[in-house]
Image (cartoon, helix red, strand yellow):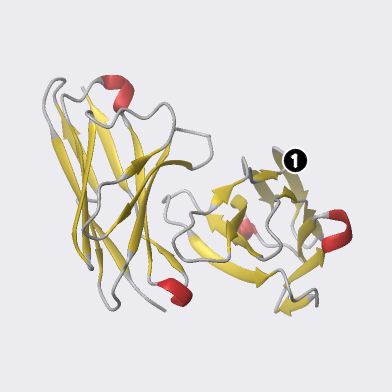
Amino acid sequence: GAVVSQHPSWVICKSGTSVKIECRSLDFQATTMFWYRQFPKQSLMLMATSNEGSKATYEQGVEKDKFLINHASLTLSTLTVTSAHPEDSSFYICSASGGRQGWYFGPGTRLTVL
Amino acid sequence: AQKVTQAQTEISVVEKEDVTLDCVYETRDTTYYLFWYKQPPSGELVFLIRRNSFDEQNEISGRYSWNFQKSTSSFNFTITASQVVDSAVYFCALSGYSGNTPLVFGKGTRLSVIA
């Protein structure tokens, strides 16, 4: 099946710093990418949907100025958590869709903000 | 709006028992996809099945089987002869038919299989 990678797989940062997470579709062109957040013992919650070359669409309650999403190419989307705080500590998972090829999930990035 | 309900928060079974995980969904779409994923402690989602709304045939894959009933909006998942390695959180999910619609997840069911 298709492969989606995320980098880094885990990151620890200090409060107030920014962290960038990359999501790449390795063997197909992803016209749409999705970013999810998963807190411990909870489900995956959609944060935003991004289409290549367009601005991301954010879910209600997700601050677009805090979670910057860039989908500059058909194989790469980035999520930048700006001025991270401990409450942003979570498991971030991206999903890439290449149309009828289906949806493929990355392995996730565990963010810990101290 | 789409919604997925997994009423069972946690299930504990003894090895070799059969276990069924329930999933009920709501959607106004006439065409859609249903999914099941396994999430082991590592966190990485493991894809188990995707079923489109046109196909109500039950499916069996080894010890896994799925029962899709459109009349009751349910897509239940059964593990036969459970094993300790089946211990994980299982998520049911729903999406529109287009690839630019996201998956909506249920809250998940944590399955513990005890040796």
SS of the residue under disc 1: loop
Percent of width and height locating residue A107: 35, 57
Q: Nearer the viewer, residue B7 or A74?
A: A74
Q: Chain of mark 1?
A: B
Q: Nearer the viewer, residue A51 or A23?
A: A51
For disc 1, the neighbor class at 10 Å (few under 14, some 14 to 19, many from 20) is some
Q: Quadrant of the C terminus of chain A?
A: top left
Please give left or right for residue B87 compared with residue B19 in the image.
Answer: left
The residue lying toward the viewer, choosing from A11 and B3, is: B3
Residue B52 in picture, x, y percent from top left = 66, 71
In which image quadrant can residue B107 be found? top right
Name the outermost residue toward the left: A17
Q: Quadrant of the N terminus of chain A?
A: bottom left
Q: Is residue A71 in sight in this rendering?
A: yes
Compared to residue B3, the image places residue A39 above or below, namely above
Give the residue at x 24% y 53%: A54
Q: Residue at x 75, y 78 (%)?
A: B60
Whether residue B80 can be seen here: no
Instruction: Using residue A66 as the reference point, say whether residue A94 is left or right of it.
Output: right
Residue B91 position, x and y percent, is 60, 51
Counting labels gives: 1
Q: Quarter of the image holding residue B93?
A: bottom right
Left/right of residue B21 with respect to residue A36 in the rendered view? right
Percent x, y of residue B11: 74, 43
Front residue of this view, candidates A50 and B93: A50
- The kind of residue on which mark 1 rests is Gln
Q: Residue at x 23, y 26 (%)?
A: A113
Q: Single out the residue that lies furthest toward the right.
A: B71
Depicted A108 relative to depicted A59: above or below:
below
Look at mark 1 in the image and give the residue it sits on. Answer: B8
Q: A39 above or below B15? A: above
